Amino acid sequence: MKESFFIFTVLSTLAFSLCQNTTPVRDTDGNILKSGNNYYILPVMHGVGGGLIKARGSGEICTTQVAQAISEVEPGTPLKFIPANPNKDGIIRESTDLNIMFVDPLACVPNAVWRVNTDVFQLDQRTLFSRGLLGSPGPQTIDNWFKIQKYQDSYKLVYCPSVCKTCKPACADIGIQNGERGRRNLALNNKPFKVKFKKA
C-alpha cells in the first residue's frame, strides 16, 4: 500500500511539474504566442522607454546591438520566437529554449538572431546582439538560446539554455544596461526587465 502511494505521489509530482513547465505564454490581448507570428517586446512599466530595437554598437557599421527604444511611443522592431523543439501547434511555452529573431534582417546580418556576447568575461557586461545562428541546438549555439519566464504579473527574458546537457552556461536574467548617449542596451544582470508581448 505504501509503495503504491509513493508511486502515485511521484507520478503526480512529475505530472504537475510538466504542466507547470509547459504553460503557454500570452500576449497583451490574452492570446497564446505562436511561432509563426510577429510580436513587439514592450516594457510593462511606463515612462522607461519603448519596445526593443536593433541599435548600432560603438564602432559598428551594422545595427546589431539589442536595445530598448528611448521614446516611450516607439513599439520597436517586430520579432519572432522559434522553439528549439518545435511542435505542430506552434505554441510558445514558458521556460523553454527559444531563438529570438528580428524579422527585418539587414544585408550585413541576414538572420538577426539574438546572441549573448560571451566574449566579455564579466557577466553583467555581457550584452545581447543579433549575430546568432538560427536553430541547431547544441554546444556550438549555446549563446543563442533564451527563455520566457513568468515574472510577477507579466514576464521576463532569461538566458539559461538547456539545449546542451554537458554545457554549464552562466545563467542570468536579462535586464537593461545604460550605454552611450542614453541608450539602453539589453544585457545579463540580476535586475530583470519586466516585459509584455504585443502582436505586430
Image (cartoon, grey):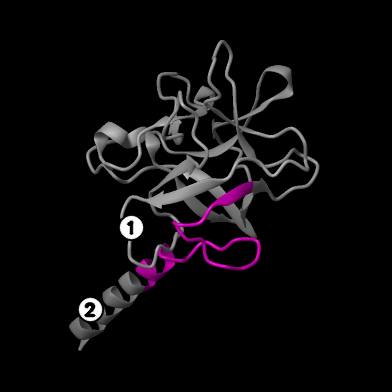
Instruction: State the image coordinates of residue 45 (x, y, percent, origin top left).
Output: 74, 48
Front in this rendered view, residue 139 or 91: 91
**Residue placed at 47% from the left, 41% from the top?**
101
In which quadrant of the rendered view does residue 108 lie? top left
Q: How many marks?
A: 2
**Residue placed at 58% from the left, 54% from the top?**
155
Instruction: State the image coordinates of residue 84 (x, y, percent, origin top left).
Output: 33, 50
Whether the magenta-drawn stretch holds residue 27 is answered as: yes
Left or right of 9 in this view: 64: right
Name the outermost residue toward the right. 47
The amino acid on which the numbered mark 2 sits, given as a three-letter code, is Ile
Residue with the mark numbered 2: 7
Residue with the mark numbered 1: 86
Left or right of 137 in this view: 109: right
**Residue placed at 72% from the left, 41% from the top?**
50
In which quadrant of the rendered view does residue 164 lie? top left
Front in this rendered view, residue 191 or 67: 67
Residue 109: mark in rendering: none
Q: Residues within 10 Å of mark 2 (few under 14, many from 20)?
A: few
How far apart, in angstroms, are the residues tagged by discs 1 and 2?
31 Å
Work out whether 111 lies above or below 100.
above
Work out whether 65 lies above or below 148.
above
Q: Look at the numbered disc 2 and give the secondary structure of its residue.
A: helix
Name the quadrant of the N terminus.
bottom left
Q: Look at the numbered disc 1 and give the secondary structure of its residue.
A: loop
Residue 169 seen anywhere in this rendered image of the structure: no
Q: Which residues are magenta?
A: 16-41
Instruction: State the image coordinates of residue 143 (x, y, percent, origin top left).
Output: 37, 33
The amino acid on which the numbered mark 1 sits, given as a three-letter code, is Pro
Instruction: State the image coordinates of residue 149 (x, y, percent, origin top left).
Output: 51, 54
Work out whether 92 lies above or below 192.
below
Residue 135 seen anywhere in this rendered image of the structure: yes
